[in-house]
Image (cartoon, rainbow, N blue to C red):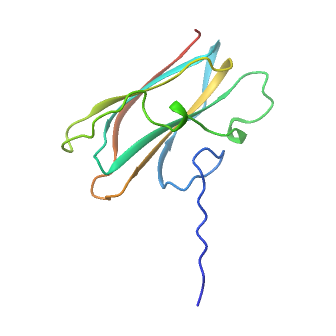
Amino acid sequence: MSIYKITFVEETTNVGGSVANKYITKPIILANESTALDIRITANVASTAAVKMFYRLSNADDARKMGDLAWEPFNSDGTPDTAVEPTENRYQFKEHKYTASGLTSFTAFQLKIVMKGTNSSYPPIIRDMRGIALAI
């Protein structure tokens, strides 16, 4: 008899995470320093699913590699700024907005979208992602 130990890994750790379905951008290098992020995705998310968004920041003075930095969730838990009603069918897409302001100044950032659900027949579908870094 073998015993398996399941280890849960938070999505905020720098490497890995227990959720199988995720998308991670390449690091985005900025010409000027910024202090805020405004990210929007268009997604089909059923009532049995969820999408969470994370970011990590770096600047020219940071000696660490981007991959060594932990992920920060938008809105402290990765949820959109305002609740978005679940979609009613597979062809309906809604905008999800994620913002973070008052951040320490950064010249590079990276995004991570975590998609999960309890019904494999209705996974979250991301149609597009748009984002801007702001100096406010």
Q: Quadrant of the C terminus?
A: top right
Residue 44 placed where, x, y %?
29, 40
Determine whether, in the image, residue 39 is placed left or right of residue 17.
left
Where is the N terminus found, in terms of image quarters?
bottom right
Location of residue 79 (image quadrant):
top left
Q: Residue furthest bottom?
A: 1
Camera-side residue: 24 or 115? 115
Left/right of residue 19 with respect to residue 63 in the rendered view: left
> What residue is at 57 percent from the left and 52 percent from the top?
17
**In the displayed structure, does residue 83 sit left or right of residue 134?**
left
> In the figure, 34 relative to 44: above or below?
above
Residue at screen point 31% across, 51% down:
48
* Residue 31 in picture, x, y percent from top left: 63, 13
Viewer-proximal residue among 128 and 41: 41
From the top left corner, tell me how far across and down residue 134 is, in percent: 55, 13
Kindly indicate the quadrant of the structure image that contains residue 96: top left
100 above or below 136? below
Give the farthest residue toward the top.
Answer: 136
Location of residue 102 in the rendering, given as x and y in whole percent from the top left corner: 61, 17
The answer to whether residue 34 is left or right of residue 19 is right
For the point 68% across and 20% down, the residue is: 104
Q: How many marks?
A: 0
